[in-house]
Amino acid sequence: MPISTDIRSALPCLRRFSRALNGSLAIGDAYIEATLQRLVSDPLAFPRDVPAKMALYQMYLTVWSGARLGAAGRDSSEASAVDRKLAALSPQTRLAFLLHTVEGFSVADTSAIMGFDRGRVSRLLARGAGDLAKELVARVMIIEDEPIIAMDLENIVEDLGHEVVGVVRTRRQAVALAAERQPELILADIQLADGSSGIEAVNEIVGRSSKPVVFVTGHPSLYLASTENRPEPAFLLSKPFSPDSVRAAVSQALFFERKARAAA
């Protein structure tokens, strides 16, 4: 299969990663162009012993480490608090954070992409998490009618340092709690205890404002096939979920929401 076919779906993710890593869309795109030029000139350099997306990121980091196409970062007066904290991290810590927390690679895959052992990557993640966590802390509401799952989600979210403002089971409860506590992030099931839709509940809460949402459902096809106006930005997790997938989705949702808010 041609390399272009393998990497096409991963390129938008790589562009997002490159922009966050370098603090600039123009510089980020320049590194991607250099990576693609390397692929064209030396296709045998593309790793074939790992998934294509991982291989693309590995090749990108090889180019990124060996070239300096511009100064990273933006003028501090224009950068958001998240941008400034990210820029202040060491390059290796910034890489580990973006690959694992924002791009959703596992610790094992992040280690393989960076060429580090897992222990080193875990230490880098722990080092970066403390500095960035303060900028990403949010009030979180959980809409989930299964008590055990709700408890698991609450524990995961609180372990990340966020405040859970409440756990509710129905659309009516969700709307009332949201009006009272003003959550900044919503984790929601789609099929609720009163037979209503989690999508409808979130839409009523969000209204015309933008609020990040993570839908956690055992029926992802219902979300994908829904004709309702789905809230944006939204992330979708399938049950059963892993704690790492919830952590990644929550962190991604808040990371991009804070950057979008600053840009606006």
Image (tube, rainbow, N blue to C red):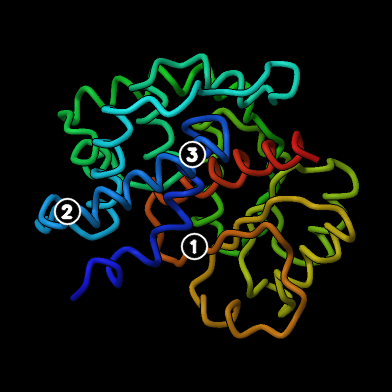
Q: Earlier in the sequence, mark 1 or mark 2?
A: 2
Mark 3, residue position: 28
Mark 1, residue position: 237
Q: Position of residue 181 (x, y in %)?
A: 84, 41
Camera-near label (3 vs 1) is 3
Q: Is residue 102 above or below residue 121?
A: below
Q: Which residue is painted at 57% across and 59% down in the image? A: 235
**The residue under label 3 is which amino acid type?**
Gly
Q: Position of residue 204 (x, y in %)?
A: 86, 65
Camera-near label (1 vs 2) is 2
In the picture, measured across the screen, residue 256 lies left or right of residue 159, that is right
Where residue 46 is drawn, which disc sits there? 2
**The residue under label 2 is which amino acid type?**
Phe
Q: Position of residue 80 (x, y in %)?
A: 70, 26
Quarter assignment of residue 125? top left
Quarter assignment of residue 184? top right
Question: CA gap, disc 3 to disc 1?
Answer: 29 Å
In this view, the residue in front, 25 or 70, is 70
Cβ atoms at labels 3 and 1 below 8 Å apart: no
Q: Which residue is painted at 56% across and 53% down in the image? A: 150
**The residue under label 1 is which amino acid type?**
Leu
Q: Is residue 211 above or below residue 175?
A: above
In this view, the residue in front, 220 or 42, is 42
